[in-house]
Amino acid sequence: MDNLRIPAIKRKEKINLYVNGKPITAYAGETVLAALLAAGYKIIKKNPVSQEPRGALCGMGVCFECTVTINGVPNIRACVTEVQEGMRVELDD
């Protein structure tokens, strides 16, 4: 996956988190959604009825299209949750 971060922006300290068991790098102050998008993840979950892939829509906590499981807790909005060292994020495959 390509890193989609803008290289000219000065970042805070690096944070390591795991998405479906795979390590990605984020930066302090970023949301989980920002880290996922920067790491190239476009599909965040699947529709529970049709199983169609879903991505983030509003990016500000209104639509609930970016809910993920974080550290075993389901239905956390990735767009309003700040990354933390060692965080484990589970996306629907």
Image (cartoon, grey):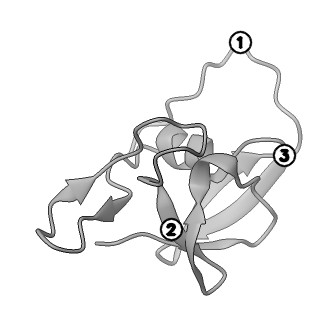
CA–CA distance between discs 2 and 3? Answer: 19 Å
Measured from the top left, where is residue 45 in percent x and y? 34, 63
Instruction: Label 3: state its secondary structure.
Output: loop
Query: Residue visible at 73% across and 61% down?
Result: 16
Measured from the top left, where is residue 93 in percent x and y? 28, 72
Residue kind at label 3, given as amino acid type: Ala
Q: Which one is earlier in the sequence, the residue at label 1 or at label 2?
A: 1
Up-down relation of residue 52 to residue 73 (above or below): above
Q: Which one is earlier in the sequence, the residue at label 1 or at label 3?
A: 1
Query: Residue visible at 74% across and 42% down?
Result: 30
CA–CA distance between discs 1 and 2? Answer: 29 Å
The residue that mark 3 highlights is 28
Q: Which one is earlier in the sequence, the residue at label 2 or at label 3?
A: 3
Residue kind at label 2, given as amino acid type: Val
Instruction: Label 2: state its secondary structure.
Output: strand
Left/right placement of residue 75 relative to residue 86 reads left
Count residues near mark 1 (Cα–Cα under 10 Å), then give few for <14, some for 14-19, many for 20+: few
Residue kind at label 1, given as amino acid type: Ala
Count residues near mark 2 (Cα–Cα under 10 Å), then give few for <14, some for 14-19, many for 20+: many
Left/right placement of residue 65 relative to residue 80 reads left
CA–CA distance between discs 1 and 3? Answer: 17 Å
Up-down relation of residue 74 to residue 87 (above or below): below
Disc number lying in front (1 or 3): 3
Disc number lying in front (2 or 3): 2
Instruction: Label 1: state its secondary structure.
Output: loop
